Image (cartoon, helix red, strand yellow):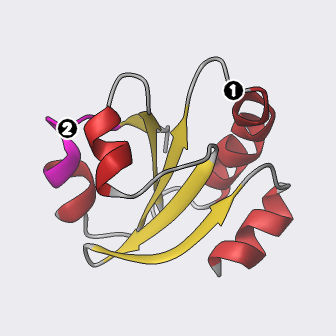
Amino acid sequence: MNEVKITSENFDAEVMRSDIPVLIDFWATWCGPCRMIAPEIAKIAEEYSGRIKVGKVNVDEEPQLAIRFGISSIPTLILIKDGKAAASAMGYMTKEQLKTALSI
């Protein structure tokens, strides 16, 4: 499963009504650590295809979503299960470190 661009318009459909957990990556184009972690997140999206949906929120384009989740530093990843935040991780991590931090 490919990564999904999450916006205010599709947030409820893609995240809140998802029948599988959603890993949201809050990022920005100018953020070095965000660019470094992107391949690790892509590996998770591929490995967990069909079991976890991976969504990307550009904080510059969707500041209201960043505010809603209290994002103060990027990259921040939040795992949403059944419409609620179940785990989070901040900063650059490898795929294995992310899996441990997010309990996936």
Question: Which residue is at the front of the view, 76 or 97?
Answer: 76
Residue occupying image coordinates x 85% and y 55%: 94
Q: In this rendering, is residue 16 above or below 61?
A: below
Question: Which residue is at the front of the view, 15 or 68?
Answer: 68
Q: Tell me the kind of residue under disc 1.
A: Cys
The numbered disc on residue 31 is 1
Residue range corresponding to the magenta coloring:
6-12
Residue occupying image coordinates x 59% and y 61%: 48
**Residue 103 can be seen in this image:** yes
Hey, which quadrant is residue 89 in on the image? bottom right
Determine whether, in the image, residue 16 is placed left or right of residue 20. left
Q: In this rendering, is residue 52 above or below 71?
A: below
- Image location (x, y in percent) of residue 63: 33, 34
The numbered disc on residue 8 is 2
Give whichever of discs 2 and 1 has the lower sequence position. Answer: 2
From the image, give the main secondary structure of the stretch colored magenta.
loop
Residue occupying image coordinates x 50% and y 62%: 78
Q: How crowded is mark 2: few (under 14 residues within 10 Å), some or many (20 or more)?
A: few
What element does badge 2 sit on? loop
What element does badge 1 sit on? loop
Q: In this rendering, is residue 24 above or below 89?
A: above
Q: Does the magenta stretch include residue 53?
A: no
